[in-house]
Amino acid sequence: MDTPSTGNLNVFLIPIDFSDAEGSVYQFDAVQEQIDLFNEWFDFHSRSALTFNWVFPRQWFRMPRSSADYGIIKQDPTYIERAWELASDGIAAADPSVDFTDNQFVYFLLPRTIEHIATDFGHYSAHVFSDEGRIPKFFGGGKYFYGVSYKGIPRQLWSLWAHETGHTLGLAGHAPVNVAGIDYMGPSLHLMYDQSGDSQILSAWDQWLLGWMPEEEVYCLPSSDLDVTDVDLTPLELPPSGYRAAMVPLSETTVIVVESRRPEGYTIPGDTGGSGVLVYLVDTTKDNDRTGAGQRLAKERFAEFVSPQGNPFLKVGQSVTVEGITVTYLQSDVSVVQSGANDVVRITRISPPTTTVGPTTTVGPTTTVGPTTTVGPTGGPQNDVVAGCGWFGSQQEAQEWFEASPGFGHGVDTNDDEVACGVGDLGGLVDCGGTSAELVLGHLCPNYGTE
């Protein structure tokens, strides 16, 4: 994508409504708050290197057809064509009132009453034109983004806009989504995985790619040059100081990334605790296969968390080893998980190099990361693989597998209470944000996996 990551960009927010979904002027004040939150997020992450000039005409532009008549269905083969039609009508309606010169992105604001555009409509290489020229990038969030997440948290337009803008900045996003060796997709800990997840922080990797994390804030040393080193990391949620990430290149295409996190600011306390050290392996030769997302299965992604349990966060004292490099969460002082405290990690080159990731999973050029069986949300895995709660149709199924699979159950018992996929486990029993009369596994919630 060609959106620049520095400078001042012209962004347009065009309100459009329909005969079957009328807009209200009372929505505009709340939307202005979303614009302000968007600006604050980019100011924090880019260190004020990227700013936005918003053009927001506070009036609704009526579309010539009903929202139902546009037939916007994300999975339909005509989706792009229909999205272009709606965007073209929206631009034409606003053109007499809006000068679209030098537009970098056009967002469409839909009424909160929208019903027939279920998720969104958008495109980043569109042939849509205004009087002033082409509108290549547009996006509009539908009914889904006026709802709540499976945890009952209201979704936000600002984080949706930030996520989509991130894609046009060149960020692939949607990874890491799982712990290596566990195909089940875990909670979102970065905005580019899921804009409505537990955290709206931009990962250290993405910040570095965009040039928003200066070199002096990244401890970086090729694996061949490492011996033993301790690195003090400032959590990404806190104001910049010291090292913000540690990166260990393993080759021209793979790198270990270590970052520190805290449940404050752009990160809310989540099921995983949201505090401590994350380690993930980035492989730039891999693409993002999201075809299993609807079943909460993580197929090939360019990055995976590395952890000895299903929870992506390392516990104090834990280590993981990737291709001869060991990362240990060294700090043992309980205050390390309190607000404002940093995390200390020890990075060690071991000899001879090994290829173990945690206690049970292996990675490397001649091994396979993850189970080698074909499984689904209602079919349990074999007993010789690390399972995730997304592979079971009920807590009882998970418990039966757990008891029959000693040594492989840490992916379903992430809180170590000897109950598989129970309350508090990653992907375990939840009430779907209050919408379910009984507790069910997270992936069985009606709106789970649609973000």
Image (cartoon, rainbow, N blue to C red):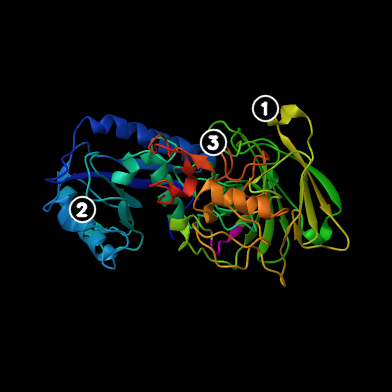
Q: Which amino acid is tagged 2?
A: Ile
Secondary structure under badge 2? helix
Q: Which amino acid is tagged 3?
A: Thr
Res. 44 mark: none
> Residue 3 occupies which quadrant of the picture?
bottom left
In the displayed structure, does residue 36 sit left or right of residue 373?
left
Q: Mark 3 points at which residue?
A: 267
Q: Residue at x 67, y 41 (%)?
A: 418
Whether tag 3 and tag 2 are in contact, CB under 8 A, the answer is: no
> Residue 267 occupies which quadrant of the picture?
top right
85 or 287, which is in the foreground? 287
First in residue order: circle 3 vs circle 1 = 3
* Disc 1 residue crowd, few under 14, some 14–19, many 20+, Cα 10 Å: few
Whether tag 2 and tag 1 are in contact, CB under 8 A, the answer is: no
Secondary structure under badge 3? loop
State which region is magenta. Answer: 299-303
Q: Mark 2 points at which residue?
A: 91
Q: Mark 1 points at which residue?
A: 338
447 or 244, which is in the foreground? 447
Q: Which amino acid is tagged 1?
A: Gln
Question: What is the magenta segment's predominant secondary structure?
Answer: loop
How far across and how far down the image is residue 154, in percent?
Answer: 38, 35
